[in-house]
Amino acid sequence: MAKEFKIEEATICPSTAQMLKKAEAEGVKTAFHRAHDMSPCPIGSDAACCKNCSMGPCRLSPKNPYEKVGVCGATYDTIAARNFARMVVAGAAAHTDHGMAMLDLFKEVVEGKITDYKIKDEAKLKYVCEEINIPLYEGEGDNEKPRSTKDLAMELYHTLEKTYTAVEGEIPFSKRVPAKTLEKWRELGVVPRGSMRELMEMMHRTHMGVDQEYQNIMRHATRTALSDGWGGSMVATEISDILYGTPKAIVAGVDMGYLEEDKVNVIVHGHEPNLFESMIDAVNDPKNIEKAKAAGAKGINLLGMCCSGAEVLMRHGIPHAGNFMSTETIIVTGAVDAMAVDVQCIKQALGPLSECYGTKFVTTNPRAHIEGSTIHIQLKEDKPRECVDKIVEMAIDRFKNGRKAKIEIPKNKKLGIHGISHEYVNYMLGGTFRSTYQPLNDNIINGRIRGVAGVVGCTNPRVKHDYVHVELVKELIKNDVLVVQTGCSAISLAKVGLMDPTAKDLCGPGLKEICETVGMPPVLNVGSCVDNSRILIACAEMVKTGGLGDSIADLPVAGAAPEWMSEKAISIGHYFVGSGVYTIFGATFPSIEGTKFHKLLFDGLESEWGLGKWDFAVDPHEMAQKMIAHINKKREQLGIAGKVERKLFDMEDRRQLQA
Ligand code: SF4
Ligand code: MSK
């Protein structure tokens, strides 16, 4: 008999649980129920299935993957590597297409063809130019003068375009990669060219009858993933900062309690910040506020979800209503008047669900129409207000005429500190006059901070929602590991208050002391999924600062995506591994233990190739222990494992450590 669905086994998020109860009472199903009713395909989840041609699909036995080969003769290792590589392509394509859209917008803004957005952060523009050797001055001697913003921005555009289009050479942000890491990539032949080329080649290689040697497939999968992390994702982050401002620490709230029954509630969900930035203008426009009031509302209330929400939580302190697994349950509140979406992680089920509750579910991006949505209104960047004003109007209409469903808003709200860009880390730790990562490195060397962990990624109904993220992070900070977060994972922790400086009391003594001194929480929210590039830059900065080795692979750091679900997570995981970071995933992993492919990912990439490596654990405590063991191993290799006298390290100390 099928096991009964139990809400308490599905989520630890009180708001989501409350809404699941309401959904059940109203006869409504969500992804939680569907995941319970539908078992995952065991052959697919172990990467033992190939459907790359019509001689198949060919299925190998997950129990004995070498018993048979595909009709063409492809072995398990070939099939698994091709499947993995295609996940990397899809994930990297999502990030790089997002980045390219940001770059297209940037060009039009610089050329003056789009006027609703402008360059907001000139300091960031100059910083990024300097990072990739674009000169800030022109002329010589007495004639030297600063270049105009427009001139700099145009050169930046043309340089960064190579991130996508370069058919040969190395992508522009490879200049940010620590020298020894870059040397390793050159030796392996994995320094990315333009992502269009890498993605195209990966698809070609994984076509039936092309690359059929798992190591060679994984070499190019590494190059492809790196073209995302140090390419497409990094461009998306940097251009968003230039256009909309680099995040700084900001106090903001999360959870469904930020819905307001007496206001028109508008939610923006997706990934690109443009829709949200324009929506902020629309809901603050006095004309729209007047219309809402005329309809009987006290005003318009704007909230974010998923990564769109993370972008504006970081930049503007707009409340975030919940992560991926709460996007359906928030509709069940009955209080959402409109949900506007763009691209990525938008469940098709939101269409029929919104219809049940009378919510206006509006798609806005030409790349993402959703059958079952209320309407598609394209956001045209040269006149974005046409789209967002229309959505606000529809939301007001629903408030006035369409709130037929019973409204129940969970009361949960949590404030925390968000907006920790890598530039802000510099300032937060080093102070205004000495912006630097040196205090971070010093405190890792002296042992107050054991190491740094990036805990990121989605939520997934195949595991208890939020539970794995929260337990993992608690265990890490208890062991003096500083945690940086992005995406849906960051929201899991924000909801339980770990982004509040009072969370210091859950830390080990060393990390607690740092948090008290700096006044920071032990868990730092660095942004959305594309902002994982901020973590790469922070790693590069730690290497540059000195005392922790010469390459990213030397650092006492680890990464985790404990409840991952999207192909983007695989691309992110693999660009961290390719950059030298030990990375552990939970939920499930697309390989079979004991196979050559699995051994390459879980050992060979580190021991033979000199990169990072993959690992897997479902239990959060086991996951934490594995991450801590890796961090300890790196501390030992650096000669900083023992209890070190607590003093500030000077250059001489650092030189000795590196000798
Ligand atoms: Fe089967 Fe080979 Fe075709 Fe894959 S490529 S479906 S293994 S015949
Ligand atoms: S939104 S990719 S569910 S983190 Fe970036 Fe969340 Fe994962 Fe989508």
Image (cartoon, rainbow, N blue to C red):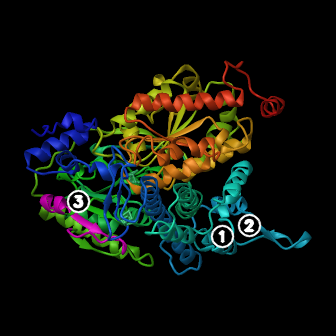
Most extreme residue toward the right is 141
Q: Which residue is mark 2?
A: 134
| Residue 433 as seen in the image, left or right of residue 359 | right
Name which residue lies at 57% across and 44% down.
604
Q: Amino acid at mark 1?
A: Leu
Near-viewer residue (140 or 93): 93
Please state the extent of the stretch shown in magenta in the rendering.
352-372
Which tag, 1 or 2, sits closer to the chain's start? 2
Name which residue lies at 51% across and 56% down.
214
Q: Check whether the beta carbons of the residues at disc 1 and disc 2 lie within 8 A of each other.
A: yes
Separation of residues labelled 2 and 3 (CA atoms):
45 Å
Residue 350 badge = 3
Q: Which residue is mark 1?
A: 156
Name which residue lies at 69% across and 51% down.
184
Q: Secondary structure at mark 3?
A: helix
Name which residue lies at 55% across and 61% down.
224
Residue 152 placement (x, y as % from top left): 69, 71
